[in-house]
Amino acid sequence: MSKTAVYPGTFDPITFGHIDVIKKALKLFDKIIVGVSDESNKNYLFTSQERIEIVNKALFKDLNLNKKKIIVVSFGSLTTELCKKYKSNIILRGLRAVSDFEYEFQLAGMNRKLNQSIETIFLMSDVEHQIISSRLVKDIAKLKGNIKKFTTKSTIKSLKEKYE
């Protein structure tokens, strides 16, 4: 039986931390659904469609990951509804630091209350990626700093175009 996991996030933009979680998940699951949130009450740098394009370029053009094992989709529903749509009972969440855990633990509990068949699995990114956040990458890019250690070439290009 095929196992599918849903990895939801804003990916504004995708970073090596996100990518590290996806690569680790590929070792554990047959298919990963990367759910790009288009929740309207957040202030995104990139539109939902731009973020989907950036994620696709990062994963498939820059890193040449397996397109048969990863699907990138937009969603504006509860994550549990996204799981239902893709017949998954696994939500993946990445953890960087202990400070992430309290929020993620609460979120996992709420998702479990919404659908008792759903499990949340936390994956730690490697140590060199744990300090990376999309917000900091955007801040550095905006100030014309070097972000090569934090994200892929095509993502860097998208950030430079946005801030020009």
Image (spheres, rainbow, N blue to C red):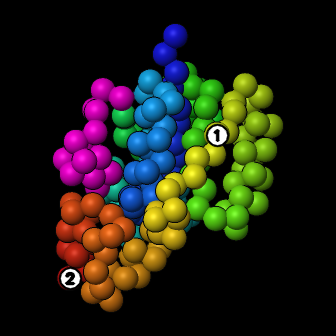
Q: Amino acid at mark 1?
A: Ile
Please tell me which of labels 2 and 1 falls first in the chain. Answer: 1
Is 66 on the left or on the right of 11, as rendered?
left
Image label count:
2
> Which range is magenta?
54-69
Quarter in which the C terminus is drawn: bottom left
Q: Is residue 17 above or below residue 140?
A: above
Residue bearing the label numbered 2: 164
Marks 2 and 1 in Cβ contact (< 8 Å): no
| Element assignment for label 1 | strand
Q: Residues within 10 Å of mark 2 (few under 14, many from 20)?
A: few
Give x and y (percent) for residue 59: 29, 46
Residue 81 seen by the camera: no
Give x and y (percent) for residue 86: 50, 25
Question: Observer-nearest residue: 14 or 122?
Answer: 122
Q: Amino acid at mark 2?
A: Glu
Asked where in the image residue 47 lies, by quadrant, the reply is bottom left
Residue bearing the label numbered 1: 121
